Image (cartoon, rainbow, N blue to C red):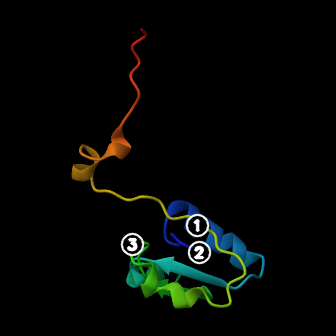
Amino acid sequence: MTGATGLLGNNLVRALLAEGFQVRGLARSEAKARQQFERLPIEIVSGDLHSIPSFSAALSGVDVLFHTAAYFRTPTQAATTPMNWRPSTSKP
């Protein structure tokens, strides 16, 4: 699962574990993931979606991949990225 420590990913990890599934979660910060999932039987893979080769080996043996990671940007990036674009509300 990508984005294991995010809002959606965190809840999905817990739901899958409660149903008895084995979970392998990708997290940018292994320390944050270990703290967040303390005492839960999740395999944490440290990595970043910008560097797929750094964690691609961890996909071996995986039957299903849940992609719950989101595009992340800092407040200063928000003002300059195209993701901030909104259509005009003026009518012709």
Q: Quadrant of the C terminus?
A: top left
Q: Are marks 2 and 3 in contact (CB under 8 Å)?
A: no
Separation of disc 2 and disc 3 at Cα?
15 Å
Q: Residue type at mark 3? A: His
Q: In the shown orientation, is residue 89 left or right of residue 78?
A: right
- Look at the picture and state if 21 lies above or below 57: above
- In the rendered structure, find residue 50 and report the number of the disc placed on it: 3
- Look at the picture and state if 75 lies above or below 62: above
Q: Residue type at mark 2? A: Met
Describe the element under mark 3 as helix, strand or loop. Answer: loop
Marks 3, 1: nearer the viewer: 3
Q: Earlier in the sequence, mark 2 or mark 3?
A: 2
Residue 54 visible here = yes
> Which residue corresponds to mark 2?
1
Separation of disc 2 and disc 1 at Cα?
6 Å
Q: Are marks 2 and 1 in contact (CB under 8 Å)?
A: yes
- In the rendered structure, find residue 67 and report the number of the disc placed on it: 1
